[in-house]
Image (cartoon, helix red, strand yellow):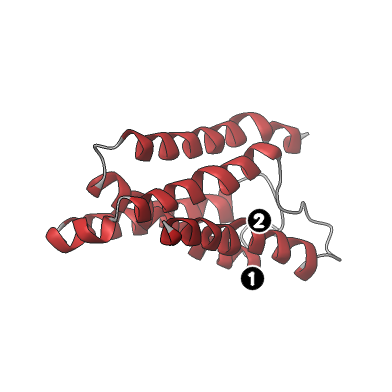
Amino acid sequence: MVDVIFLFFVTLLFGPIMFFIISRYFYKNKNLIKYPVDVIDFIGDCMFIPFFNALLAYYNVIDFIKQNSGYLWFCLVFAVLLSFFWGIHRKNISLVNDWSRPKLGKFNFGGWYHMIFFFIQTFLGFIGMFYLGDNILIWFAVSGYLFTVIYHYFVETKRFKN
């Protein structure tokens, strides 16, 4: 149980807490939207992602991987593809400039940090879906996070367009 709690807090540290530190302290003098850009984004990063990672530890996904490591290639390929397309969209298409992208077509340190975190988390997400796909809590965490992303993208970002 200690590893579950540990992974939950490590995820918080390397995700939302570092995003907060990077946006508030590294870029405090920049006129950029700071992290969290909205409440929904904050909920996804602080609740669903750490919960998902804690579930990976709780269900001991490492044992499943040891039994059948064949899915790891699928997880890696899907994570690379999704991260690549998300990065292109975030860097070159998204309308919102914030702590991780000061202007269109340019990531700063915060953007690259977020990109690496996104890749790792996407890889872990695919591992959870492939190896623990029969568990409803895994799908609750994944769908909860995806809901926050979709809500943020389609509803909350309309505020920034005006």
For disc 2, the neighbor class at 10 Å (few under 14, some 14 to 19, many from 20) is some
The residue pinned by badge 1 equals: 109
Q: Nearer the viewer, residue 101 or 76?
A: 76
Quadrant of res 14:
bottom right
Q: Is residue 49 left or right of residue 107?
A: left
* Residue beneath the point at 78% across and 62% down: 24
> In which quadrant will I find the C terminus?
top right
**How many marks do you count on the picture?**
2
* Residue beneath the point at 57% across and 48% down: 45
Real-space Cα separation, disc 1 to disc 2, in angstroms = 15 Å
Which element type, helix, strand or loop, lies under badge 1?
Answer: helix
Dot placed on the residue nearer the N-terminal end, 1 or 2: 2
Which element type, helix, strand or loop, lies under badge 2?
Answer: loop
| Residue 16 at x, y percent in the picture | 63, 56
> In which quadrant will I find the N terminus?
bottom left
| Residue 69 at x, y percent in the picture | 16, 61
Q: Is residue 6 left or right of residue 123?
A: right
| Residue 72 at x, y percent in the picture | 22, 60
Residue 101 visible, this orientation: no
Going by the numbered disc 1, the residue's amino acid type is Phe
Going by the numbered disc 2, the residue's amino acid type is Leu
The residue pinned by badge 2 equals: 104
| Residue 112 at x, y percent in the picture | 57, 67
For disc 1, the neighbor class at 10 Å (few under 14, some 14 to 19, many from 20) is some
Residue 47 visible, this orientation: yes
* Residue beneath the point at 61% across and 59% down: 105
